[in-house]
Amino acid sequence: MAMSYTTLTGDKTVAGSIKSWVNYTRLDVDTILEEAQTTIYQTLRVREMKATQTLSVTSGVDFIAHPADLMAPVKLRNVTDDTELKALIWDELEERRTWTNGTLDTGDPCFFSISDEAFQFDCKTSSAFTLRLAYYKTPELLSGTNETNFLTIRYPQLLRAACLAHAAMQYHDDSAYGLHMQRLSALVLGVNTQDDFDDHYGQFTRD
């Protein structure tokens, strides 16, 4: 049976359900499924998660809110003057910032860091400009109105491993949880490696 939200959250008698996999009925399968997907998306980086977005930055600000579905930034470019902003960790950005009489200096941002749900700049902007963000997004979770997604279609083995791990957590089997998480980590690594290979070399190997 094809993997879907309805199948996964079905009763133990439903083939392909989480309850049938573990032969146990007293499970909060909606929570298991949500936590399983969240766990996968923390480390999975595949083409279905890639996105771009433009952000309008006004003059006189030192940050801009990032997209709500941001998982990890790839590139942040000022397309008004065609310059790339370099990513820094938070304390490095603080070291780059300069202040005059308690006010952050104004200029053209060259660096950014992420904190407080926003892209923080190394200076206050001296003019308005447009940013283009390339990033990995958090996909929409499976639900009654979103029965399938790329996990159920292309990577059902990932979702099964993650669901089994979080089911084991619910019924307090630490050993099973550890084994399923090890399997999940290995599967995610393999998928990421293959996706990276396809991204860089696939165009030369396909007919």
Image: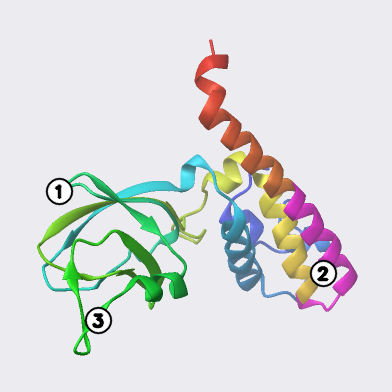
Task: Identify the residue position indicated by label 1 in the image.
Answer: 80
The residue identified by callout 3 is 99
Which mark is first along the chain, 2 or 3? Answer: 2
Mark 1 or mark 3, which is nearer to you?
A: 3
**Is 4 situated left or right of 160 in this image?**
left
Q: Secondary structure at mark 3?
A: strand
**SS assignment at label 1:** loop
Label 1 to label 3, Cα distance in Å? Answer: 26 Å
Vertical position of residue 143 compared to residue 196: above or below: below
> Residue 205: where, in percent of width, then height?
57, 15
If you read the primary sequence from the N terminus, does the residue marked by circle 1 or circle 3 appear first?
Answer: 1
* Residue under numbered circle 2: 24
- Is 75 on the left-hand or right-hand side of 6? left
Residue 20: give x, y in percent of width and height: 78, 59
Q: Quadrant of residue 179?
A: bottom right
Q: Could you tell me which secondary element the residue under label 2 belongs to? A: loop
Question: Badge 2: how crowded within 10 Å, few (<14), some, or many (20+)?
Answer: few
Query: Which three-letter amino acid code belongs to the residue tagged 3?
Result: Trp
